[in-house]
Image (tube, rainbow, N blue to C red):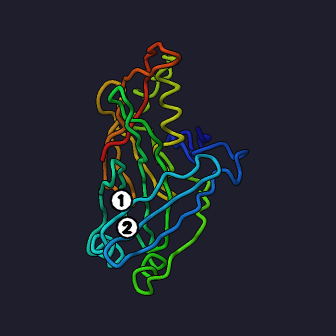
Amino acid sequence: MGGIRKPGNREICNCQYDDLRDGIRRHILVKVETDGNHLSFSTFSPERGSHGRFLIQVEKIRELVEEKAYSLCDMDCGNHVYIWSHKGILRFTFDWLSAYGDGTLKGIRQHLELPAEKVISVLVTGKPLHTVYRPDSSQACILSGRAIKVIREILKDKRKKRAFSKAMRDCFQWRGDTVSLYPDSRYSFYFRTASGFPSNGGLILHEDAVRVRGSMFPKLYYGVHT
């Protein structure tokens, strides 16, 4: 969790996705190709490897880059993507998922940004794009003053405190944006963003169970809902 810069406003800033010691392991290699009907997105990171490719219809992407639409949700082969278009930048959140025999889904969430002009170039020329996305260590600035009572309650419980700390590290990787938290339910939050992409949503506490060496253990985690 980043430091508090202005005690009066309770700002939590510079939330980092991974420790800076990871260095180049956090970089993401991105390949974008087109067959005329679809754009395919493939990613690879030294930290998490590759996860196949994601196909999106050309017309859907064209609406984003031409600013006829501001966001897009899509699914391909069980994987999910959410894309925001803002000021010439396309922000991607990929959920790469795998199905297991016990009926559960597991996977990773991957964030990256691409200039819209580079994606347009693939559409126009048909030439593949190969690029490296280097995550900025400075992520969204979080204003928590109106939710400080909820946060104080969370910090009293070790498991909830750990889940909240991970949420501050992982959930708002929106470079240059400002997120304002408001109390919602007992341990969850409602939020608004300065950019408007997304304009608002919820940071919700979930309870689940994970299997470790044949035994089930309870797990608490926060998820963003928009």
Type of the residue with mark 1: Phe
Between 214 and 48, the one nearer to me in the picture? 214
- Vertical placement of residue 105 versus 41, above or below: above
The residue depicted at 65 percent of the width and 51 percent of the height is: 46
The residue depicted at 63 percent of the width and 47 percent of the height is: 47
Kindly indicate the quadrant of the structure image that contains residue 144.
Answer: top left
What is the total number of numbered labels drawn onto the structure image? Answer: 2
Split into 4 quadrants, where in the image is the N terminus?
top right
Type of the residue with mark 2: Ser
Instruction: Report x, y in % for residue 84.
Output: 37, 62
The residue depicted at 47 percent of the width and 24 percent of the height is: 152
For marks 1 and 2, give the one nearer the viewer.
2
**Is there a contact, CB below 8 Å, between mark 1 and mark 2?**
yes
Which residue in the structure is indicated by mark 2?
A: 85
**Looking at the image, which residue sits at the far top?**
215
Q: Helix, strand, or loop for circle 1?
A: loop
Instruction: Report x, y in % for residue 80.
Output: 35, 51
Q: Helix, strand, or loop for circle 2?
A: strand
